[in-house]
Amino acid sequence: MGAGKREAQADNGLKERHPIQVVARRTGLTPDVLRVWERRYEAVRPARSSGSRRLYSDDDVERLVLLRRATLGGRSIGQVASLPTDELRQLVEADESAQRQAPAAARAANSRGREESPSASLSATEHLDACLEAIRRLDVPGLEAALNRAGVSLSRTAAMEMVLMPLMHRIGDLWREGTLRIVHEHLAAAVVRNILARSTEGPLAPGSGPSLLVTTPAGQLHELGAMMVVGTAASEGWQATYLGPNLPAEEIAVAAQTRQARALALSIIYPADDPRLGAEIRLVRRFSPEGMAIIAGGAAASAYRDDLEAIGATILPDMQTLRATLEGLRKVPSRD
C-alpha cells in the first residue's frame, strides 16, 4: 500500500483507527500474540500513529479474526498467515462447512479425540489462557501439562514466542496490578525452568558453542525473562548457563572469568526506577573480562539505556533480535 493511500485512509478515520487493545478484544487474540503474528509471520501490517502506536484497519481486524478461526480449526498460523484474505476466507468457510456436515459419529469421535489430546484444537491464545489458569490455582501439574501441550501443538520456536514469552509478560503485568502474587511467579519460574531443562535434554548449559551467561542484576528478582533467553540461546547451540536472579556485579564477573564467557545476557524486568541499578550495571563492565559482549533486554531495560549504552551493551527489543545478535556474536573470534 502506497504512503499517499495509507495517509488518506488514516485521515478519513475509516481505516487505520483501531488500537491494539481494541483489536485484542474484537479478535480474542492477546496483544502479545498479535505482535508475534505481525513480526514473525507478517499476518497483518498495521499503520502507526504519530506516537508510533499500532493502528489496525477494519480489513486487518477481519483478517485476524479469520486467522484465529483457521487456527481453531486445526491449522497452524505458519500455514495460513501468508494466504490472501479472500483465499483465507474460503479456506475457513470450507473447514467450518466440512465440520458442520460431518456425520454425528465422526463429530463425536473428533470431540473425544480433542478431549484426549486437547492441544490439537487449541490456538496459542488458548494455550496461554490455560497456563495462566493453572498458575492462578498454583497447579504445578496443570501448568506443566499446559506447556507440554503447547510444545506438541506448536513448533518449539512458536511455543517459545507465542506462549512462553507472552506468559512471562502477562505474569509481570498481573503481578504489578496485584492480581497475582510473587508466589505465583515463583511457581511459574520453577516449572518453566524444568520445561526448558527437559527441552534441551539435560542441564541448562547444553551445546558445544561459545559460552553465554544469563542472569538478572542485583535488585532484579523476576527471572522468567532470563530463562527464556537460556532456552533461546541453547536452541541456537550456545553453552547457556543460567546463574539465577538478583546477582551482584562481582559475582557475575567471577562467573564470567571462570566460564570464559563470550557474552553476558542481563534480563531487566522490574523495577524500572531503581536508583542503584545504574551503578551496578557499570560495575558489571568494570569487573568483567575485556571483550566480553553484554546484551540486555526485558520490559525495563530501556529505562536504563544511558547506563547500558555507557558500557557498550546492546539492548534487545525481542527474541527475534536476540537470535540475530547471538548469530552475529558467534562469528566474532574468541578471545583465546
Image (spheres, rainbow, N blue to C red):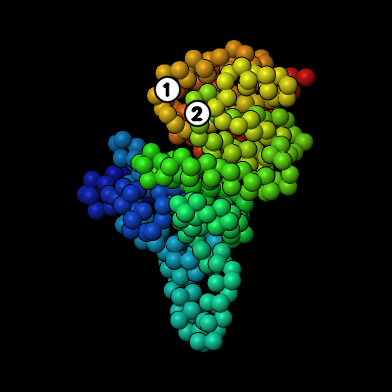
Whether residue 333 is situated above or below residue 282 in the rendered picture: below
The quadrant where residue 154 appears: bottom right
Is disc 2 placed on a helix, strand or loop? loop
Whether residue 83 is situated above or below residue 324 in the rendered picture: below
Do callouts 2 and 1 mark residues in contact (Cβ within 8 Å)?
yes
Whether residue 155 is situated above or below residue 331 in the rendered picture: below
- Report x, y in % for residue 111: 53, 77
* Left or right: 29 in relation to 109: left
Residue marked by disc 1:
274
Packing grade of label 2 (10 A; few <14, some 14-19, many >=20) is many
At 41% across and 56% down in the image, what residue appears? 29
Instruction: Say whether disc 2 or disc 1 marks the residue closer to the N-terminus.
Output: 2
Q: Which mark is residue 220?
A: 2
Please state which amino acid type lies under the numbered disc 1.
Answer: Asp
Q: Seen from this angle, which residue lies furthest left?
A: 12
What separation in Å lies between label 2 and label 1 (alpha carbons)? 9 Å
Q: Which mark is residue 125?
A: none
Q: Is residue 135 visible?
A: yes
Q: Can residue 82 be seen in this view?
A: no
* Left or right: 119 in relation to 62: right
Please state which amino acid type lies under the numbered disc 2.
Answer: Gln
- Report x, y in % for residue 76: 55, 61
Which of 83 and 208 lies nearest the eye of the viewer? 208
Packing grade of label 1 (10 A; few <14, some 14-19, many >=20) is few
- Report x, y in % for residue 72: 48, 66
At 68% across and 33% down in the image, what residue appears? 241
Is disc 1 placed on a helix, strand or loop? loop
